[in-house]
């Protein structure tokens, strides 16, 4: 039987990474967001199809290296931007990858593993046709992203759950 890695975290729930002269111990993200967990701060509300795509995108983003952006449409992963120093860079990476494969982003949904500290990602997403966004919320500037989503006619769903994977 395996004991604990550290007294505060059972071994089965730990992700351990070595880094230079130390280690990073992170709790495994085992939470699955459901439709009951979502709140919609925007004027525009999602269709059933969008909710399904948003929840699928959230499952993908929780298992993607942070900073992460996922683009989904019709139950299919279109692209991901992953491991970037900023969410804007991750979104731009995802857009370039989707376009390189000829995927149509109009009507897609976007997931972010963490909140948007500024409305720039919402603006960029709207420019390529993203129609719904799922994110945890929790920024002191959430209002700016919500306002930009409302201006752009984008649905925003908030989970209250931040995913962060290293």
Image (spheres, rainbow, N blue to C red):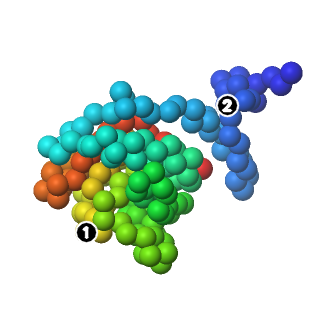
Query: In the image, is residue 70 above or below residue 141?
Result: below
Badge 1: few (under 14), some or many (20 or more) residues near its Cα, within 10 Å? few
Reading the image, the residue beneath label 1 is 127
* Quadrant of the rendered image containing residue 58: top left
Which label is found at residue 4?
none
Quadrant containing the N terminus in the rendered view: top right
Q: CA distance from mark 1 to mark 2?
A: 40 Å
**Where residue 107 sits in the image (x, y, percent)?**
30, 59
Q: Quadrant of residue 89 in the image? A: bottom left
Q: Which residue is mark 2?
A: 13
Residue drawn at (50%, 43%) of the image: 59
Residue at the image position 72 percent from the left and 29 percent from the top:
12
In the rendered image, residue 18, in percent from the top left (x then y), is placed at 73, 50
Q: Around disc 2, counting alpha carbons within 10 Å, would you say few (fewer than 14), some (14 to 19), or many (20 or more)? A: some
| Residue 102 shown left or right of residue 19 in the figure | left
Q: Callout 1: helix, strand or loop?
A: helix
């Amino acid at each position: 039987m395996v004991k604990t890695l550290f007294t505060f975290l059972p071994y089965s729930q730990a992700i351990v990474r070595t880094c230079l002269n130390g280690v990073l111990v992170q709790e495994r993200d085992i939470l699955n967001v459901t439709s009951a967990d979502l709140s919609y701060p925007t004027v525009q509300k999602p269709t059933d199809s969008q909710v399904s795509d948003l929840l699928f995108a959230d499952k993908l983003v929780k298992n993607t290296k942070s900073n992460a952006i996922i683009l989904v449409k019709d139950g299919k992963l279109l692209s991901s931007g992953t491991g970037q120093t900023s969410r804007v860079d991750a979104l731009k990476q995802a857009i370039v990858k989707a376009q390189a494969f000829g995927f149509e982003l109009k009507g897609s949904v976007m997931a972010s593993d963490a909140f948007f500290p500024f409305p720039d990602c919402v603006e960029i997403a709207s420019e390529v046709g993203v129609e719904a966004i799922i994110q945890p919320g929790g920024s002191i500037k959430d209002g700016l992203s919500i306002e930009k989503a409302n201006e752009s006619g984008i649905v925003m769903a908030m989970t209250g759950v931040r995913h962060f994977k290293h």
